[in-house]
Image (cartoon, rainbow, N blue to C red):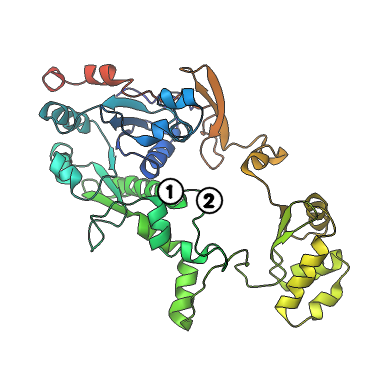
Amino acid sequence: MTPAPGSTAAGEGPLAGLRVLDLTHVLAGPYATGQLALMGAEVIRVERPAGDDFVRGHGGTEEMRAAGLGASFLSQNSGKRSITLDLKGAGDRARLLDLARSADIMVENFRPGVVDRLGVGYDQIRAVKPDILYASLSGYGPDGPLAGRPAYDHILQGISGLMAMTGEAASGPMRVGLPIVDYVAGQALVAALLAGLLQRARVPGEPQHLQISMLDAMTTLMGAYALHHETTGQLRGLEGNRAFADTPYSGRFDCAEGAIVITANTPAQATRLCAALGREDLLDQGAPGQVADSLREIFLARDADHWEAHLSEANVPAARVRSLAEALDHPQMKHSPAWRDLPVPQLGLTLRAPALPFAAPWGPKTLAPVPTLGQHTSEILADLPKEAAS
């Protein structure tokens, strides 16, 4: 096999030597396979000839979008190779099956049943590669009354209960500001695949068709709220900036300029907060609403930078509310292993882009370029047996 291109040098990383066929599109699936590529796997992105994955043209400059290298695409496709195949045609379907013979993992995120109709479902792939680790990511899983519905992040935020606790009474339910269900599901897919690889080593030959549901991935993260409702009958509603710990000493507070978030959940933290503000009397106020009102008045006296420095010095967890641009420009992020240089040679750019969200001795120091649509089709097909490539 051809080693994965990348700056974890080619063939390095814990997944070096593994080939992944990536039939995913949009965000959740490509995010997961992008993480595998950053761990050293060779990821072959199988795209439709029409190039209709909308993230290629989403975000960034007009030039980036026109080149099929939109910001959303650049953020999660480093180091992959791209091949275009029309799986509705017998020839290209045969080529994919031949590629599958050399693959370790295949990932798809079509609606349940679509890959079977195309002739590249689990049973069809396993017929040519018995030990394939096959993962299907969908909105609701393969069973149940919603199985056939289309699924998008915004829809999943609504149906999962997430929106019902996001926002305030005046706003009504609101979506979280980023496509969080996509990325939660993507992380679940990464975990499932890594566990599947370990299981394959333990029990060689065991059939493994992994099913990842976006709805399951999101709702399991809200287990504490679910069990609270199950045992008390109480359902948390629109949370606004209410702290998870239900203490008036935590939350978001407007300042003379900007805003600050504070987490003083424990009695010790609340004591330090009140001492730092010179308001120990707030510890004796019985009504949480009165405490919160007093804190709101206090924080309006100075700007958020002052309060962040003052409270941090007093060992009270606090931070000024920042934009993403401000967060990435913070000195703490200057040497973050999670952000690396990504060359975009097609446009003469080098961008700072996300890598693995953790530090590891084998992690990438720089990122390999992302592929243009079908960039590697010829070289990948050239490696196939002649009867399959013809």
The quarter in which the C terminus is drawn is top left
Q: What's the CA distance linking mark 1 and mark 2? A: 18 Å
* Residue occupied by mark 2: 177
Q: Position of residue 119 (x, y in %)?
A: 13, 39
Q: Examine the rendering and report whether any part of residue 30 can be seen.
A: yes
Q: Is residue 87 left or right of residue 157?
A: left
Q: Residues within 10 Å of mark 1 (few under 14, many from 20)?
A: some
Report x, y in % for residue 251: 68, 64
Residue 169 lies, in percent from the top left, at 56, 69
Is 65 situated above or below 139? above
Position of residue 180 measured from the top left corner of the image (x, y, whole percent)? 47, 51
Mark 2, other Cα within 10 Å: few <14 / some 14–19 / many ≥20 = few
Would you place residue 247 above or below residue 332 in this image? Answer: below
Proximity of marks 1 and 2: CB atoms separated by less than 8 Å: no
- Name the kind of residue labelled 2 in the image: Gly
Q: Quadrant of the N terminus?
A: top left
The amino acid pointed to by label 1 is Gln
